[in-house]
Every structure is written in structure tokens, then in C-alpha cells.
Image (cartoon, helix red, strand yellow):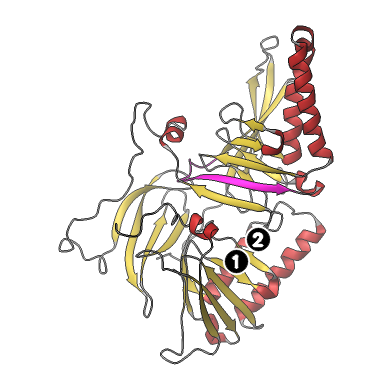
Amino acid sequence: MEDKNSIESPSVFQPISGDDTGITEISSMCPNPRCQEEGTTRLLLVEIPFFREVIVSSFSCPHCFCSNSEVQPAGIIQEKGCRHTLKVVKNKDLNRQVVTSESATVQIAEVDLEIPGNTRKGTLSTIEGIITRTVEGLQQEQPIRKALYPEDSEKIENFIEKLNTLLKNPSFTLVIDDPAGNSFVENVNAPSDDPNLKLEFYKRTLEQNKMLGLVADDATEVPDNTIQLPETTEELNLNEEVMHFPTNCSSCNAINKTKMKVVKIPYFKEVIIMATDCEKCGHKTNEVKTAGGFEPKGKRITLQVKCIEDLSRDILKSTTCGLQIPELDLETQSLACSGKFTTVEGMIQDLREMIVTSNPFGKGDSAKTGKIVNVAERLDNYAAGNENFTLILDDPGNCSFVQNIYHPEVDPRLTEEEYERTDEQNEDLGLKDMKVENY
């Protein structure tokens, strides 16, 4: 459903680790009420690897030396909120890049620290920077507190000491909860999974939608954005028709039309393919969802890719499916990307494009860069059929599929194994909160 001959629109966003060649400078009045002279605001559109685009702004005044900085998401509020949970266990973790939007709440349970959302501007910083700015903010009014409220001042001094201890001996859990879905914590193992970082997506509550301005203050329920389909199947044959419904572009927010079609995969099940092509900015998205509910058990599919024919196999990767290539020690996270219906070769090319075009924050570090270059070269060999490898799809929802080219005979290079889901996997799939018996 995607036109391969179309020309992609050039991006105005700079890689976060690239040269600052896209900085725009404008003159603006100093916010300091005692100054109000003319200063300079610098704007930079930045593309954060494995995340999205943000706008970084910085102001400086040459007269009173007032300065500030701010980060704003360049896109729209996301469909779901996100919660990043990071176990900080070593000094290197303090250098992880972090994006916090205005709506994000920052928590460190070990010291009872909570910075609520909508109390500060969005920032692009590090974990050390978040703690350091918190300490500086608490120290600003300490001389006045010490003179007027000595007991409160002493308590704050003790709390500041706890925060400084975290920087000296890091061993704590950082939680960033953003209802807008526009916050981010660096994965230092990208594109592989990070064992110390957990990313969850959730549906916003009515109060969170009110806070973000998505519903009126007097609203009593979250609006239902479900597409209304015909009440009877006589009105529309979903297996033959391509449906169109209005949506907003995830890149420029322009009004678009998303195409949707139900497709039957032989020897598997029906899937829903959705594709959007923005005429304004050229941004394209496509997504595949399996029709029907989750299976009683999860499934792990292992394919030994040993010849060119294996690269041509059809493959369906659902949104709940994780992908692994043991030979590269490569693992992608489930529940964090859209579903895709392609071939084995197409999946490898997608992985290669993600790694090469979206370098992680460590770009410039010889060790990290060398690892990424090696992975990209190996993936090129895999896609060309020059090297054998193992592809593993681990899907707790059991909605993924790899074509058996020997059907109905047994495929010697393809194995499928069902397993009982863990409580955590059922929680991620939303099954623990769903009534599935005697409904």
C-alpha cells in the first residue's frame, strides 16, 4: 500500500549528535523585569534517535546575563501516555539523555522525590542534570528559610544531602510518567533491549485528558474515538472494500485519510492493514493488526534462515511481538512499535534502516559507533543471503506468523512453540483487567 517510487520530503530536523547547522537566531526581549533589554533566542529542530522530533530553544541576554532553555515536542500529543522506569545502578547511568515534557511527573521513590507535571518547562538533559537542577532549586531560598524558618531549612538541607548522595552512590529507581506520551529516556543498548529500562503505554484517565486540554473541563467521560462501522454486514463487505477515515498526520498534524483493509493470510487468520500517506509533508505510516482476540497461550517462532528462499517468506509481526537475532545479540522491545506485514528480507532491511538512519545517543563514541557499524554490515549480509542467521519472534499475544513454504509438510527450518504467559505479560496485554469468562 506504500508507493516505493515516491520521493521522501527532506527533513528539517537535525540529528541530536550532529553539527548545530540548523540553528535559527531571533531577537527577543529579556524576561528579567529589571532588564527588559534585547537578547537572543536560538531555536534548533532536533531528531532524537528511536524517539521523535523536538524543538530546543535557548535564550541569553548580554546585558544582565539572564539565560534559560526549553524543550517542546514538535509533534502532537500521543495517542497514549507513557511511563519510563529506569533502575540506576552505576555512575554511567547518570549520563543517560532524558527528555521530559511539561506534563511529565518525575519520581525517585528512594528519597520520596516527586516533581509534578505542569510546574516547569520541557527539558532535554541527563539524569544527573535533573537531580542537580532540583538541588539548585532547593538551595535558592535557603538563606531566607534559615533566617525565618530554621526547622524547615534544616529538613531541606537533609533532603539536599540525600540527593547529593544519589549522585555519589547511584542506586535508585527513576520513574518518568507522561500522560502526553512525549517524554523519553535513553536506551544505552539501542537497538537492543535494555534490561534496566521498562517502557509502558497506558490509556489516559479523564482527569489527565482535562489537564492536557483534550476534553472540556465539564466533561464526564473520555471521548470514544472508535470508528463507527455499518451495523449490518450487508451494507459493506470488509474483505473486498478499502475503507477510508479521517486522521491527523503524526508528523505535521495535517488532516489526512487513512486507508484500511481486511486481508486473509492463508493458514493463519485475518489481519487489518492501515496506511496513511500525508500529502502535505510526505510522511508515511503503515500498521498491521490481527483481527480477533488473543490466543490462550503465547507463541515463540524460530526460523533458521539458510537460503534465498527463506528471505522471501511472508512474515507478520504484531504489536505485541518481540524480535531477536541471537547471532547479533539483537533484541527489539515488544509493545513499543507498530505491527508489520512484510517478508523476512523486508524485516531485516527495516532493522538496518532504523540502526543506520537513527543512530543512538552514543554517536561519536568509538565503541558504540563501531558496534552499530558492525551490526549494520551483518544485516546487509543477511538481507543479501550471504550469511545464515536465526530469526526469533516471541509473541505473548500469539498474533504473529511466519510462512511455512513446505505446507502442508513440516518445515525443517521453522519451529513454533506455545507457552504459558507470565503475570507480567498478561498485565502488559491488559488481560488481567479484562472479563473473558461468562461475559
Residue 150: x and y, percent? 78, 12
Residue visible at 70% across and 58% down? 189
Q: Nearer the viewer, residue 366 or 165?
A: 165
- State the residue lying farthest toward the left: 234
Of 12 and 175, nearer the camera is: 175
Counting from the top left corner in percent of width and height, residue 12 is at 58, 46
Q: Amino acid at mark 2?
A: Pro
Query: Is 188 left, or right, of 221 in this rendering?
Result: right
Amino acid type shown at disc 1: Leu
Label 1 secondary element: helix
In the depicted structure, whether residue 122 falls above or below residue 63: below
Whether residue 82 appears in magenta in the rendering, the answer is yes
Numbered badge on residue 351: 1
The verdict on residue 79 being magenta is yes
Q: Position of residue 96 (x, y in %)?
A: 73, 46
Q: Residue furthest right?
A: 168
> Which quadrant is the N terminus positioned in?
bottom left
Write down the quadrant of residue 219 in the picture.
top left
Q: Is residue 141 visible?
A: no
Measuring 61% from the left and 61% from the top, which residue is drawn there? 354
Instruction: Give the residue pinned by disc 2.
Output: 191
Query: Which residue is depicted at the point 75% across and 22% down?
Result: 156
| Residue 164 visible in rendering | yes
Magenta extent: 74-88
